[in-house]
Image (tube, rainbow, N blue to C red):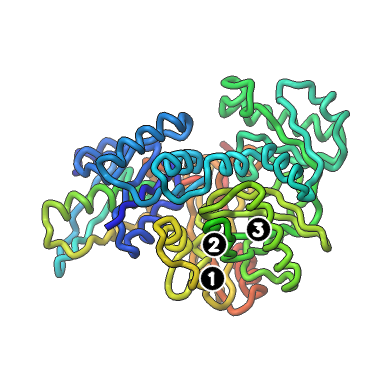
């Protein structure tokens, strides 16, 4: 997946897996990106769940407010 | 499990809230956007790339998609996608405001004409092209008036004029805004048209609701306690429940119901903005969508549901009428941009969050980004949220917290 999100200057890191819950951290263009939640739920989560059906949940532990180069900034 | 197509602008504030609501309802989601998802090829069916300008073409795309992934509902998070949501819903036989009703509600001039024809008291108005001579247009105008470019939304480009010379200045300023975003150059039509209407005095309120089968369910009336008298109309504080007398609130709801009916808004969310001056209630606009920005976060319903969840429930034919707004008061401040320039930093955030009643603060402009105030700009600095027992406490908390924030701006 990282080559995909890298197209927008982003990257995703697996922090840990605990009790079948995956903890992920987003960085670069994904951090604070207005579409990060879509990338996470409609991309990363779908792919992970399809390939690893045992996954019980996915948590984004990113501090999005600290992002300084989001690929897309939300507007009014 | 049913599948819903959620349509977001690529710059949407609402994606996360709608995705969370869909997850809580246990429905499949396809996220449709004018932004191609970078992982789309690895997760077929989870996203759909559609534009907002060519509605017929995007409708065909949605219909083709639905033949592989049947859709139970289509919901647009923002205004720009409502024509597509209406057209595609019509093509697929799904519950939604009709295409015609969405057209009437989105076009401020059409809305005024339709409501006037139906006998709804409306301000005087006329439509001019920005290619006209502004001095000539001003000579046919009664003051004070408000100039509203038809191609822009929210308060962008909306300017009050109290005299002909102010009118001409406002006209050229709006022309500059439209030229900057290349509207005038691309079109001689609606995009370069401007609605000129009477300035409506009074307090401003917003009404949030869902129309189901032509029946309006009012979810909240929100006061806007800051006077919005121009020359620009920046929104700041919204507080619910309203502090207007019960009888006035009843009249507001009845008025919105009439307006929605005359425009043909039959199935979906509505967000209406009105002016209330003594006994006179006037409609500023009624949009075929829910409240914008992050403001929906202040609307929570019992038993535990968000506004987005109620919208999805309606679209999917699930029960939603028994949800009531949580007790107590809630409010949001859309943090204004103090002046144009490059944002250096926003200080005092911790002090703002310590104010009793404040429950959230989000700065949505990144340091280093250029900030443009109204009427040229189209963004807020961020959002401040409060919750308390009474509306006065909420309003006070928002003002105190905002006063503790220090926005440092450098010249662009």
* Upstream in sequence: badge 1 or badge 3: 3
* Upstream in sequence: badge 2 or badge 3: 3
> Dot 3, how many residues are within 10 Å of its Cα: few (below 14), some (14-19), or many (20+)?
some
Mark 1 highlights which residue?
A: B358
**Which quadrant, please, contains the N terminus of chain B?**
bottom left
User: What secondary structure is found at the residue carrying circle 2?
Assistant: strand
Q: What mark, if any, has residue B384 been given in the picture?
A: 2
For residue B411, what is the image quadrant? Answer: top right
Along the line of sight, the residue nearer the viewer: B409 or B288: B288
User: What secondary structure is found at the residue carrying circle 3?
Assistant: helix
> Is B352 on the left-hand or right-hand side of B49?
right
Q: Residue at x 39, y 48 (%)?
A: B6
Disc 1 chain ID? B
**Which quadrant, please, contains the C terminus of chain B?**
top right
Residue B236, position as x, y percentages in the image:
64, 56
* Upstream in sequence: badge 2 or badge 1: 1
Above or below residue B40? Residue B318 is below
Q: Residue at x 28, y 60 (%)?
A: A61
Q: Residue at x 46, y 32 (%)?
A: B55
Respond whether the residues carrying marks 1 and 3 are from the same subunit.
yes
CA distance separating discs 2 and 3 = 30 Å
Mark 3 highlights which residue?
A: B257
Camera-near label (1 vs 3) is 3
Residue A3, position as x, y percentages in the image:
19, 38
> Is B198 on the left-hand or right-hand side of B222?
right
Residue B205 at least partly seen = yes
Q: Residue at x 88, y 28 (%)?
A: B139
The answer to the question of whether label 1 and label 3 lie on touching residues, with beta carbons closer than 8 A, is: no
The answer to the question of whether label 2 and label 1 lie on touching residues, with beta carbons closer than 8 A, is: yes
Along the line of sight, the residue nearer the viewer: B209 or B181: B209
């Amino acid at each position: 997946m990282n080559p995909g999100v890298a197209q927008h200057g982003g990257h995703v890191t697996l922090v840990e897996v605990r009790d079948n819950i995956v903890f992920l951290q987003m960085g670069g263009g994904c951090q604070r990106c207005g579409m990060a939640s879509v990338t996470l739920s409609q991309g990363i989560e779908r792919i992970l769940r399809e390939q690893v059906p045992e996954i019980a949940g996915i948590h984004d532990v990113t501090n999005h407010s600290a992002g300084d180069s989001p690929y897309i900034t939300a507007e009014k | 499990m049913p599948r819903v197509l959620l349509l977001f602008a690529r710059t949407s504030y609402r994606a996360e809230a709608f995705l969370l609501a869909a997850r809580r309802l246990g429905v499949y989601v396809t996220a449709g956007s004018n932004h191609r998802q970078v992982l789309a090829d690895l997760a077929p069916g989870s996203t759909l790339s559609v534009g907002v300008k060519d509605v017929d073409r995007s409708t065909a795309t949605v219909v083709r998609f639905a033949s592989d992934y049947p859709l139970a509902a289509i919901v647009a998070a923002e205004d720009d996608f409502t024509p597509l949501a209406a057209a595609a819903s019509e093509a697929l036989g799904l519950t939604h405001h009709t295409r015609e009703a969405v057209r009437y509600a989105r076009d401020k001039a059409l809305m005024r004409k339709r409501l006037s024809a139906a006998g709804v008291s409306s301000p005087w108005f006329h439509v001019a092209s920005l290619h006209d001579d502004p001095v000539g247009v001003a000579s046919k105008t009664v003051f004070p008036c408000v100039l509203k470019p038809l191609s822009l939304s929210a308060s962008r480009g909306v300017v009050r004029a109290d005299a002909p010379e102010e009118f001409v200045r406002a006209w050229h300023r709006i022309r500059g805004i439209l030229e900057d975003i290349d509207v005038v150059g691309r079109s001689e039509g609606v995009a370069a048209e401007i609605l000129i209407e009477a300035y409506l005095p009074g307090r401003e309120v917003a009404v949030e609701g869902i129309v189901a089968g032509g029946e309006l369910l009012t979810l909240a009336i929100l006061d806007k306690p800051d006077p919005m008298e121009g020359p620009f109309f920046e929104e700041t504080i919204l507080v619910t429940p309203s502090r207007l007398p019960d009888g006035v609130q009843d009249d507001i709801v009845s008025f919105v119901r009439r307006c929605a009916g005359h425009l043909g808004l039959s199935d979906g969310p509505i967000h209406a903005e009105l002016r209330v001056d003594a006994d006179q209630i006037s409609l500023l606009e009624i949009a075929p969508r829910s409240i914008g920005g992050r403001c929906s976060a202040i609307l929570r319903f019992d038993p535990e549901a968000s506004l987005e969840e109620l919208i999805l429930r309606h679209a999917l034919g699930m029960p939603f009428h028994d949800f009531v707004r949580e007790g107590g008061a809630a409010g949001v401040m859309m943090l204004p941009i103090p002046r144009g320039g490059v944002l250096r930093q926003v200080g005092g955030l911790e002090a703002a969050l310590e104010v009793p009643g404040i429950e959230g603060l989000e700065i949505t402009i990144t340091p280093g980004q250029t900030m443009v105030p109204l009427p040229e700009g189209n963004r807020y600095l961020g959002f401040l949220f409060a919750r308390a027992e009474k509306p006065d406490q909420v309003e006070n908390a928002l003002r105190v917290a905002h006063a503790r924030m220090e926005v440092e701006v450098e010249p662009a």
